[in-house]
Image (spheres, grey):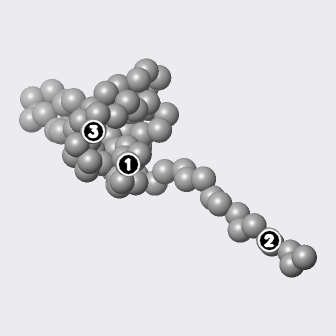
Amino acid sequence: MISMRGAGTKPEALPMSSVMIKCPNTGRSVSTAIETEPSMFHRLPKIAARMRCPACGQKHVWMTSSAWLAGEPRLVEQVRPVKIEAA
């Protein structure tokens, strides 16, 4: 997307980020080959998308709810240690 900053000025490109998912086979972060602005990413519809994974070569179905933008912090589920008591 191009942003115009005042009349008669050159268009200024807005920062774009790659939409990322986690490969379910390798656990690696991979690009979906989609680039977007952060403000547009948060407005993407909640639909399923398909892609061929560059990490494992398989086709994956992913949702925007499981994706994130490269270079941006993301929420991750924290695993709490389980206390095992001796019998």
Q: Quadrant of residue 32?
A: top left
Question: Label 3 to label 2, Cα distance in Å?
Answer: 38 Å
Which residue, given by chain and number where applicable, does mark 2 sit on?
83
Nearer to the camera, 40 or 2 = 40
* N-terminal-most mark, 1 or 2: 1
- The amino acid type found where label 3 is placed reads Gln
Q: Secondary structure at mark 2?
A: loop
Query: As drawn, which residue projects farthest toward the right?
Result: 87
The relative height of residue 81 versus residue 46 in the rendered view (above or below) is below
* Quadrant containing the C terminus in the rendered view: bottom right
Q: Quadrant of residue 61?
A: top left
Image coords of residue 78 (percent x, y): 63, 58
Instruction: Determine if residue 18 is in view.
Output: no
* N-terminal-most mark, 1 or 3: 1
Give the residue displayed 40% in from the left and 54% down from the top.
27
* N-terminal-most mark, 3 or 2: 3
Say the numbered circle drawn on residue 25: 1
At label 2, counting other C-alpha atoms closer than 10 Å, the crowd grade (few under 14, some 14-19, many 20 or more) is few
At label 1, counting other C-alpha atoms closer than 10 Å, the crowd grade (few under 14, some 14-19, many 20 or more) is few
Q: Quadrant of residue 8?
A: top left
The relative height of residue 71 versus residue 69 in the rendered view (above or below) is below
The relative height of residue 52 versus residue 46 in the rendered view (above or below) is below
Give the residue displayed 42% in from the left and 40% down from the top.
67
Q: Secondary structure at mark 3?
A: loop
Question: Label 1 to label 2, Cα distance in Å?
Answer: 29 Å
Query: As drawn, which residue projects farthest toward the front?
Result: 87
